[in-house]
Amino acid sequence: MIYKNLNWKLNELSFNVFDKLKICKFILFDSFWTMNKNVLEFENKMSNYIGSKYSVFVSSGSTANTILAYYLKDYFYTSKKNTIVFPSTTWTTSISPFIREGFKPKFIDISLDNFCMDLYKLEEYLKTESNKTACVFITSLLGFTVDINRLTQIGKKYNVKIMMDNCENTYGKYNDRNVSSYFTSTTSTYFGHQLQSVEGGFIFTNDYTEYEQFLMYRNHGMTRSVKEKEKYENKNVNPQFDFYLLGNNFRNSDIHAFIGLQDFKRIEKSTNKRIQLFNYFKSNINSNIVHLTTETKGSTDVAFSIPLVFKNIEHKKIILDFCKNSNIETRPIISGNLLKQTCYSHFDDYTKFENSEYVDIHGFYVGLHPKLKFEHVKLLVEEINKLNV
């Protein structure tokens, strides 16, 4: 068989030559590169886009999650309420910061409908264990959206805090609202994700007190990070270095904010192209060969990648070989079954998480981005559909 060199990458740089010239001009003529006016502008634009009252731009999606871990430890952790619920397939830094802060993880299997946490299994757990649950931390895996309405009802019914990791779902909507506007949430603006600032991440919240805490955690725990300093100030220390919280340096720079603002202009175009490409794939692939997710009622998913979860494990091997020979980059479905990973294996028996195991064994993903060509997706779909059911 003769293979075409498709040079199909997981993602590609969004920026054109004019963007690069603007970035060069910024570097040459702006002498303030650390966190300043561009960070604030990026935060304000993201708040308006997401529909969240407050945004905090940080150094990565992982540090955004770490700030949430700090906050939950300082304000929600007790000796009895010390558990956080996570999906069994997600990225490691959606979990590790919370464990480092002393929380006990409880893993819930994912649903094959949307690759998010199975809400039926979550509710079964909370029926008896809500009194020790500090938070449920949901991941929008690969850009697919959980049933936000049902999740909200579960949170209210069992009086548990809901937070979301939307690092792979910056653009997704539920009932015409951005997914990140419903709960305190994080996203990533890393090069490989949907909106690019090269490195970066955001926290979104509608709670002003949370916002103040997040600002201080980002900047060493210092009170001068917030406007209403008098609420937190210590009269016994110099106000320039007044540390209210045990924070860290999770600030981002004006350079990354300036870069992110260039890509921000393309959000609508980028979103539409991702939706068109994924819809083409989903409409034309043989669902007897590849497992397809079901879009949650009310949601508009903007896929992070194209997941290929094969019903026959031999088909996976064939298409992985095709991708390798056609120069198509691939990755596992994020962590796969997290409970098989060395650092998580002692928390539970990985064989209990049947859907995570299925996705891990049967699946991988290929890139989905605005520069991806329709003819490349068409070629991959045709190759998959040749397989015998």
Image (cartoon, rainbow, N blue to C red):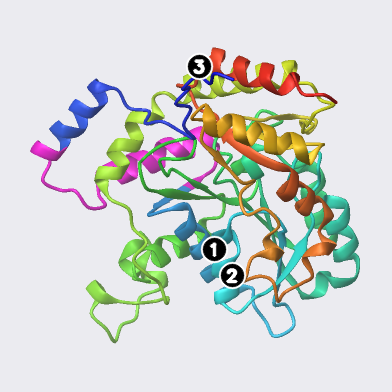
Q: Amino acid at mark 3?
A: Lys
Residue in the image at 31% along x and 42% along y = 257
Sequence-earlier tag: 3 or 1: 1
Circle 2: is it few (<14), some (14-19), or many (20+) Cα within 10 Å?
Answer: many
Say which mark, if any, is on residue 68: 1
Tell me which secondary structure the magenta stretch mostly adopts: helix
Going by the image, does 144 lie left or right of 91? right
Report x, y in % for residue 7: 44, 26
Circle 3: is it few (<14), some (14-19), or many (20+) Cα within 10 Å?
Answer: some
Q: Amino acid at mark 1?
A: Leu
Report x, y in % for residue 342: 62, 70
Going by the image, does 347 lie left or right of 209? right
Residue in the image at 65% along x and 41% along y = 364
Query: Which portion, as a residue range, is magenta?
Result: 27-54
Quadrant for residue 132, please give it: bottom right
Quadrant for residue 127, please give it: bottom right
Foreground: disc 3 or disc 1: 3
Q: Secondary structure at mark 1?
A: helix
Sequence-earlier tag: 2 or 3: 2
> Compared with residue 228, is residue 289 higher up or lower down, i.e. above or below?
above
Image quarter hosting the N terminus: top right
Foreground: disc 1 or disc 2: 2
User: What whole-number distance in Å separates the C-alpha atoms at marks 3 and 1?
Assistant: 38 Å
Q: Secondary structure at mark 3?
A: loop
Q: Secondary structure at mark 2?
A: helix
Furthest toward the front, the residue is: 1
Report x, y in % for residue 216: 39, 66
Look at mark 3 in the image and give the residue it sits on: 373
